[in-house]
């Protein structure tokens, strides 16, 4: 049987990495939005309108991806904190 060992430090480290990824993904999505707005400013046609309409419909999906990454990172951080607190309580109870 396999074993999985995860420490609070591991969780904190991975939560931090996820936060960095979240910022990176958010930046990429912002750049895409900026470029789409630029395209809209220089291209006026029914096809351009349809492209922008579809992009506007999809943008909330992009935002939900960023939110999911943030939620996951927060969960990992909170789990690491809870793990550290539980370890401290157990350690203190053994020495009492």
Image (tube, rainbow, N blue to C red):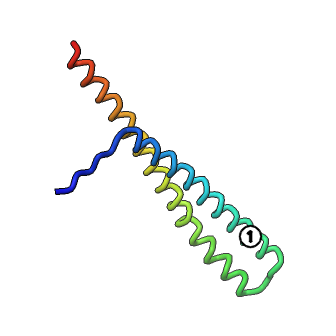
Using the rendered view, name the quadrant where residue 8 is placed: top left
Which residue is located at x 72 percent, y 72 percent?
A: 36
Question: In the picture provided, is 91 more to the left or to the right than 79?
Answer: left
Q: Position of residue 5 (x, y in %)?
A: 29, 46
Mark 1 is surrounded, within 10 Å at the Cα level, by few (under 14), some (14 to 19) or many (20 or more) other residues, namely few
Question: In the picture provided, is 76 more to the left or to the right than 95?
Answer: right
Question: In the picture provided, is 44 more to the left or to the right than 23?
Answer: right
Q: Decide which of 26, 2 is in the foreground and name it.
A: 2
65 in relation to 94, above or below: below
Q: Decide which of 71, 93 is in the foreground and name it.
A: 93
Dot 1 falls on a residue whose secondary structure is: helix
Question: In the picture provided, is 50 more to the left or to the right than 61?
Answer: right
Image quadrant in which the N terminus is located: bottom left
Q: Decide which of 73, 49 is in the foreground and name it.
A: 73
Instruction: Give the total of numbered labels.
Output: 1
Q: Position of residue 22 (x, y in %)?
A: 55, 54
Q: Position of residue 35 (x, y in %)?
A: 74, 70
Q: Decide which of 73, 90 is in the foreground and name it.
A: 90
Q: Which residue is mark 1?
A: 35
16 in relation to 37, above or below: above
Q: Residue furthest right?
A: 42
Which residue is located at x 55 percent, y 65 percent?
A: 62
Which residue is located at x 20 percent, y 19 percent?
A: 94
50 in relation to 13, above or below: below
Using the rendered view, name the quadrant where residue 86 is placed: top left
Which residue is located at x 32 percent, y 45 percent?
A: 6
């Amino acid at each position: 049987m396999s074993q999985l060992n995860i420490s609070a430090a591991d969780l904190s480290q991975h939560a931090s990495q996820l936060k960095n990824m979240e910022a990176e993904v958010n930046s990429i999505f912002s750049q895409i939005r900026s470029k789409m707005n630029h395209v809209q400013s220089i291209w006026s046609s029914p096809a351009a309108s349809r492209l922008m309409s579809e992009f506007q419909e999809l943008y909330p999906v992009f935002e939900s991806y960023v939110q999911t990454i943030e939620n996951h990172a927060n969960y990992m951080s909170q789990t690491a904190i809870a793990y550290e607190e539980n370890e401290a309580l157990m350690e203190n109870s053994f020495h009492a």
